[in-house]
């Protein structure tokens, strides 16, 4: 059985930052109101002090066009090795902010933006987090596996971790 720990404000932002930046790659979903939902992997650049999640994107990308039509997005993070999961719902903005681009740029992006920080195709996507839900282990993956094994053998329910809502 998991404990439920809902968080708000700075505690929620701290947990959101820990999980999203620790996992890094998420499945970024657009077109939430219609099928099929469009999903693609994206690398998280930062979770800022307000709980906004930042990504790099190309001006001409489908996701930028989809966000202009409907700004609702869902992000799904999963780190199997530590049994850590995060689902984020929010609203997306496509921005060209040269200062923020310089702040977030670490050079890896050159693979997609060959002209560097000044590439005319570079934009930022800012997700304004409305609510997130997380599942996390208390003891790490190895201890969690041992607890599951004990529960299977003894038939006794074991404390499996913590989960809850995050509202920045």
Image: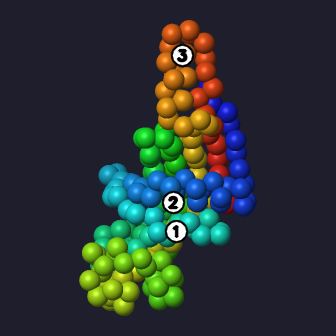
Q: 45 above or below 88?
A: below
Q: Residue at x 56, y 9 (%)?
A: 154
The reply to whether callout 2 and callout 3 are in contact (CB within 8 Å) is no
The reply to whether callout 2 and callout 1 are in contact (CB within 8 Å) is yes
Q: Quadrant of residue 163?
A: top right
Mark with earlier residue (2, 3): 2
- Would you call the spot at circle 3 few (<14 residues within 10 Å), some (14-19), or many (20 or more)? some
Q: Which element carries disc 2, helix, strand or loop?
A: helix
In the displayed structure image, the side of residue 111 where residue 97 appears, left or right: right
Residue 27 - label: none
Q: Nearer the viewer, residue 48 or 70?
A: 48
Rendering coords of residue 34 (x, y %): 38, 54
Quadrant housing the C terminus = bottom right
Q: How far, Cα to Cα, is label 2 from label 1?
A: 7 Å
The answer to whether residue 88 of the structure is visible from this angle is: no
Q: Which residue is mark 3?
A: 150
Q: Which element carries disc 1, helix, strand or loop?
A: strand
Q: 100 above or below 168?
A: below
Q: Which element carries disc 3, helix, strand or loop?
A: helix
Front: mark 1 or 3: 3
Q: Which residue is mark 1?
A: 46
- Would you call the spot at circle 1 few (<14 residues within 10 Å), some (14-19), or many (20 or more)? some
Q: Which residue is mark 2?
A: 21
């Amino acid at each position: 059985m998991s404990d439920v720990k809902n968080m708000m404000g700075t505690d929620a932002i701290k947990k959101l930052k820990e999980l999203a930046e620790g996992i890094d790659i998420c499945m970024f979903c657009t077109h939430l109101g219609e099928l099929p939902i469009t999903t693609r992997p994206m690398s998280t650049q930062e979770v800022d002090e307000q709980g906004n999640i930042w990504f790099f994107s190309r001006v001409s990308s489908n996701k930028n066009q989809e966000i202009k039509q409907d700004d609702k997005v869902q992000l799904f993070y999963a780190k199997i090795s530590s049994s850590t999961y995060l689902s984020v719902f929010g609203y997306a903005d496509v921005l060209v902010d040269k200062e923020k681009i310089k702040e977030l740029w670490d050079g890896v992006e050159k693979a997609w933006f060959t002209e560097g920080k000044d590439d005319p195709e570079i934009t930022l996507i800012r997700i304004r987090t409305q609510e997130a839900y997380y599942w996390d282990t208390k003891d790490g993956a190895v201890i969690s596996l041992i607890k599951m094994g004990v529960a299977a053998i003894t038939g006794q329910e074991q404390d499996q971790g913590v989960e809850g809502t995050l509202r920045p």
